[in-house]
Amino acid sequence: MQCIYEEKMKLLLLCVVIFWASKTAFTYEDESKKISDDMIEESVIRAKGLVDKAYAETQNNLKQRLKKEHLSIGDMMAYSKQPTATSITAITKADYLDATLQVLTEKLKCIYKEPFNISDVLTPEQMETINQLTGCAYQYLPRVCPLHSPYRTITGECNNRKNPMLGVSNAALKRLLPAEYENGYDSPKGWTDGLKINGYPLPMARALSNAIVRFNTNSLELDANRSQCFMQWGQFTDHDKSLSPDTPSVSAIFKGVDCLNSCAKGYPCFPLPIPPDDPTKNSSDCIPLFRSAAACSLSSLIRQQINVLTPYHDASQVYGSEIGLATKLRNLTNDLGLLAINQNYTDNGRPFLPFSDDEKITYNDWLPLLLGKNMLKYIPKYTSYNETEDPRVSNVFTLAYRMGHTLVHVLVYRVGEGYVPLKTNPAIPLHRTFYNPAWVIHGGGIDPLMRGMLVNSAKINRQYQIMSDELRDHLFESTNKLGLDLAAINIQRGRERGLPGNIKTILKVSFM
């Protein structure tokens, strides 16, 4: 009798579980139906209006500043960081999508009493509707590739005939590990003040920079095996493979806050607060930071960052990664296909950006110095084209590759012909050269700088001297109200991108 009783009790408990599970399912379905098509359409219209307004305000402010008789370096920098042409179209669609989700979230707070994620509420059909209304659904439409063209495209489209959109510009960086956002899908860690991560307060990025990265540059140790050319070529290759610009607006889309003159958080503003005991900066200030522009994502609501360049090693930083920019860079007065050259200045009679017939230096000379004897373990010798290989740059690699910042010297050297130091300004503090092309145009051209990098050693990365204060305290000092901190920005950028926090895992997968 006891066994029969126990079995009946188990059956009763099972029925109760099934009943409540089914009730929960029906409740979710009923709740999702509260989001009508009209609500979605109204939210998209509202979101587009907010994004367009923020974009327009930014563009108008920049245009007014550019019309000034004396243009500041800061104005030039702000203008140069704006996305262009096809990139702005792709980024705008992604911002429409993101803003729509935020508008819907605010509307649904009146319906749901408990905290919720918008990703748990919308049905796949409703997400498809939002993708279509924002324009994201058309970002990745199949392309018709020419059958017999022997040329690769400037955008990367159709380079892989079986998967024409694999490795194109203006697409999302790939994820090697799932993103870790504060709310699970788009808010960076540190977005909510006071919220603990793994049971502990999240330290300020600037405080970490002060505690771990700061060192006395008077005892700078140099690399006996690598010249400054090693560092510079690393930056050159980085600018070939990935570029994730800031979201175009410098005003908070929902709060109307000017991100350049306020320390308030509000998309896309994610400023870095200054600790109260900071050795060089006032705690009432902050280091401005804008969220990286997003890419449209059709399969998930999880925020992904855009790469406006092609991921191939194809000199995107010279030729561009979209048709409009590539056309502007060409000399169209003849059919030779040459790059346009500077009509106002020459480098000792030679045009700036000259062609070179030398072989790609990266694989033969640079990578062996970076990866050492284990290079072939990470990058085996090329055998043949593999159409199943995913060429996209990983999101985590764009942060791990910033190890090059630890190799930057505090000085920029200029050496004359015969490798004799120039009589005037042979060594310039690095921060004085930022956005200052006069050192090239009126200082003897590129050759003195190249000679200086060739004969002087790179800074070596050591645990006790990670990054110099030229980058950690004086970055773009002449363009901002205070010098930026590249080490702190890198930390904050990792949080903003939703990158996982395990550094060993990051370093392992970034070279897979």
Image: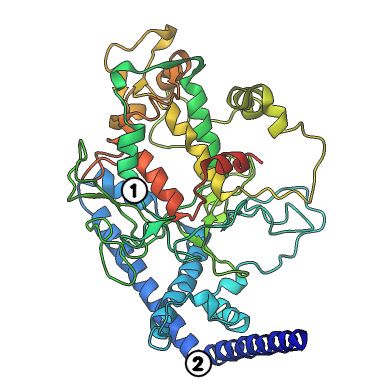
Q: Quadrant of residue 192?
A: bottom left
Decide: few, some or many residues near mark 2? Use Cα within 10 Å; few <14, some 14-19, many ≥20.
few
Quadrant where the N terminus sits is bottom right
Q: Quadrant of residue 135?
A: bottom right
> Which of pointers 2 and 1 lies earlier in the amino acid sequence?
2
Decide: few, some or many residues near mark 1? Use Cα within 10 Å; few <14, some 14-19, many ≥20.
few
Residue 184 placement (x, y as % from top left): 50, 65
Task: Name the residue type under label 2.
Answer: Lys
Residue at horizontal 35 percent and vertical 43 percent from the top? 488
Where is mark 1, residue-wise? 203
Task: Name the residue type under label 1.
Answer: Pro
Residue 495 placement (x, y as % from top left): 43, 52
Q: Quadrant of residue 280?
A: top left
Q: Is residue 282 left or right of residue 194?
A: left
Residue at horizontal 67 percent and vertical 51 percent from the top? 153
| Residue 443 against residue 112 in the figure, above or below | above
* Residue 433 can be seen, yes or no: no
Q: Is residue 419 left or right of residue 442?
A: right
Q: Is residue 73 left or right of residue 497?
A: left
Q: Nearer the viewer, mark 2 or mark 1?
A: 1
Element assignment for label 1: loop
Quadrant where the C terminus sits is top right
Element assignment for label 2: loop
Residue at horizontal 42 percent and vertical 75 percent from the top? 102
Circles 2 and 1: CB atoms closer than 8 Å: no
Where is mark 2, residue-wise? 34
- The residues bearing labels 2 and 1 have C-alpha atoms spaced at a distance of 40 Å
* Residue 418 can be seen, yes or no: yes
Residue 71 placement (x, y as % from top left): 24, 47
